[in-house]
Image (cartoon, rainbow, N blue to C red):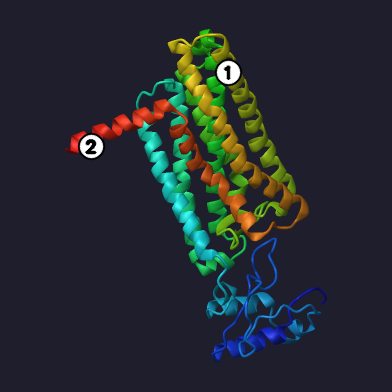
Amino acid sequence: MTGNLPEIGPLAEHLQCARKGGTPLMADAFHGPPKHTGISRGTALNPRRCVWKKMFSAGNQTAEAGLSVAELMVDANMTGLGPSRCMEEPGATLKTCIIAVMCGLIILGNTAVFLVISSSVSGWSGNSRHVLISLTGADAALALIVIPLNLYASSVPQLRNHTDSPFCHIVVFLDATILTSSIYSLATISIERYIAVFFPLRYTRLMTNCRVKALIALVWLLPPVLLFPISIPRGIVKVYFSSASLICNLDFSSNMPYTLTLTAFIFFPCSLIMTFANCRLWFAARSQRKRFRLTKVSRRHDAASRILLPVVIVYYICWSPCVCNMIYQALMHQRVPEWLEFVALWLPCGNGFFNCIVYFWLNKSFRKKFQEMGQKLCWSKS
């Protein structure tokens, strides 16, 4: 029996010593595929304590002892001595606080957006508001469902240390489905605005209420179909809990063709649609402002067009690191540095809050409507 396996002797001695009062130290050894290895820099090792050692020798002692490394690890976790309790991930508390604050901001921001766009807003048609409500619902679902589930997984040792657990499969499936619905909603808004500005005479015939509702239904029904394999434990893709990012994550290297297929069917088509439509809208609005004095109707379309270009810029800022991380892991079978992974995996969720900033601070109609609603609420209480 050959391979780079830890020796059972030191592990067994560690367990015996730890049960007598020793304090094990280990830095995320069984971190999930692909792994961060080694003890964190700056960690002080007390020679009087029992330390988990990573040995590189033949596994003869494993066969002689009749035990596997996995069995010893299970034993260690059950007695509270495993890696999940040996050493806290550096910065875990700070990361948890960042995630919790982001969750609260997403809920507050999208609640305000929903209250505003549920009524009539100058510059946005009824169809635009319906698609925007779909986008707001997707962003809010991330904060209400996905983020709490990931925080729960980070607090349960059994889920943190169990690779390819059914719970993480469900969480990753929900996360990917909701994020994909959010991307599709952004692309749908871009298409709707493009038709409204460049084909105003044909708009009512092309974008009927039934067609808009069908597009919204497609936005929510297509992602579960594309991502259904993720929900199956021990299926074609593996998942793991990333203690570096405090999130249930897809092991992109476990099935490279499927990972590349997801980027091909989700990220790149929507990115092309949003870039083409919104760049043309922005250039058209700019040209219109230079040549003609804006009429009341053209001002409405221009207000909606100006807001979409910043939304696309924010979209690329939030999603490009995540997609690059996916492709890098799939091709190189390695993980990026810890904090870089944390930022890359959580930025798409933060897109839900950044959209709220763009809607309110760059759109006068939204700000005005929000102020009117606030004044009415204050008057009703007084």
Query: What is the quadrant of the N terminus in the image?
Result: bottom right
Horizontal and vertical percent position of residue 297: 45, 12
Please say if 352 is above or below 4.
Answer: above
Residue annotated with mark 1: 286
Relative to 249, say whether 134 is above or below: above
Tag in front: 2 or 1: 1
Q: Position of residue 140 (x, y in %)?
A: 44, 42
Within 10 angstroms of label 1, few (less than 14), some, or many (20 or more) residues?
A: few
Q: Residue at x 79, y 77 (%)?
A: 56
Is residue 215 at least partly visible in the picture? no
Q: Secondary structure at mark 1?
A: helix
| Left or right: residue 270 compared with residue 122 | right
Residue in the image at 66% along x and 44% along y: 323
Amino acid type of the residue that numbered disc 2 sits on in the rendered structure: Cys
| Most foreground residue, 311 or 2 | 311
- The foreground one among 201 and 213 is 201
Q: Is residue 121 left or right of residue 331?
A: left
* Residue 378 marker: 2
Furthest toward the front, the residue is 290
Q: Element type at marker 2?
A: helix
The alpha-carbon separation of the residues under discs 2 and 1 comes to 39 Å
Cβ–Cβ under 8 Å for marks 2 and 1: no
Identify the mark nearer the N-term, 2 or 1: 1
Q: Nearer the viewer, residue 287 or 54?
A: 287
For badge 1, the amino acid type reads Arg
Q: Position of residue 301 (x, y in %)?
A: 49, 17
